[in-house]
Image (cartoon, grey):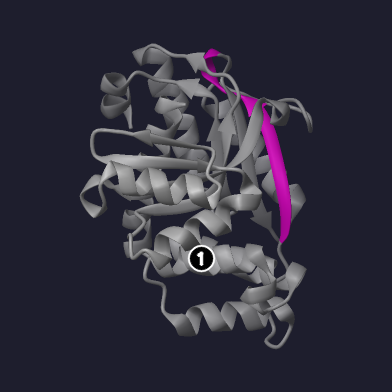
Amino acid sequence: MAGHSKWAQIKHKKARVDAQRGKLFTKLIREIMVAARMGGGDPDHNPRLRLAIDRAKSYNMPMENIERAIKKGTGELEGVKYENAIFEGYGPGGVAILVVTLTDNKNRTTGEIRHLFSKYGGNLGSPGSVSWQFKERGFIVIDRSAADEDTVLEVALEAGAEDVVTGEDSYEVYTDPREFENVKKAFEEKGIPLTQAEITMFPQSTVKLGEKEAERVIKLINALEEHDDVQHVYANFDIPDEILQKVA
């Protein structure tokens, strides 16, 4: 878990760089559009949309962009129709990889994702081949300077969190997906700022990698995440921190 949560935070920092060059905004807009199309344009009654909006705001997306994306999703404005497509496969070292996409052409995306797996030493598998190795969980990160440990523990556990892990620089709060909104809201009501808050996939077991394999896996993951249709990439690797910092 420690290796995965460390990687999740590194990806979060990388996303901020992507946001600065506009690349991330395209992906966030797609997610808002699909969420609005599936559950309606009112975030108070559409948890997926509310989470997508919160994520977009955390990267300083202008409200007018968010509102336009919602209207495209609900059909008030004309827009491209995107659909979810999930790809599963294995990377170097036998690492299980789950790729979540939003695409307007599944056949094209399938070919391109298969090519990336092959190019970087992996293999695209069949549906269900690796998804069983992951579990959906709420994940919240709080900077240690934002609150003391006792306060974080009290707020988290009273709101229904499953676990709180105290790290060197931050607290990591883990929740059942159904309790995520309650826990997130509890921190917000206490005025405790959140560095990161999302519902994500965590591996139920991990594959330990040395430096050479870790470098190959990270290259594959980075290539997948650079693809315009890819929203999220999840992998079940365990990379020691000193190696992760070198290859990330």
Residue sitting at x 53%, y 61%: 27
Name the one closer to the observer, 177 or 113.
177
Instruction: Give the image location of residue 163, x and y in percent.
Output: 48, 36
Residue sitting at x 72%, y 28%: 132
Badge 1 local density, few (<14 within 10 Å), some, or many (20+)?
few
Report which quarter residue 90 is drawn in. Answer: top right
Q: Relative to residue 116, is residue 84 drawn left or right? A: right
Instruction: Give the image location of residue 46, x and y in percent.
Output: 68, 69
Residue with the mark numbered 1: 26
Instruction: Give the image location of residue 29, x and y in percent.
Output: 55, 69
Reply yes or no: does residue 240 show up in magenta.
no
Name the one closer to the observer, 245 or 175.
175
Report which quarter residue 91 is drawn in. Answer: top right
Residue farthest to the bottom? 76
Instruction: Give the image location of residue 137, x and y in percent.
Output: 59, 41
Name the one closer to the observer, 175 or 54.
175
* Res. 38 in view: yes
Residue sitting at x 56%, y 20%: 95
- Vertical comparison of 119 with 111: above or below: above
Q: Relative to residue 236, is residue 155 drawn left or right? A: left
Q: Main secondary structure of the magenta part?
A: strand
Stretch in magenta = 83-93
The C terminus lies in which quarter of the figure?
A: top left
Residue sitting at x 43%, y 70%: 57
Q: Relative to residue 199, is residue 171 drawn left or right? A: left
Name the one closer to the observer, 75 or 229.
75
Q: Amino acid at mark 1?
A: Thr
Reply yes or no: does residue 86 show up in magenta.
yes
Report which quarter residue 62 is drawn in. Answer: bottom left
- Vertical comparison of 228 with 67: above or below: above
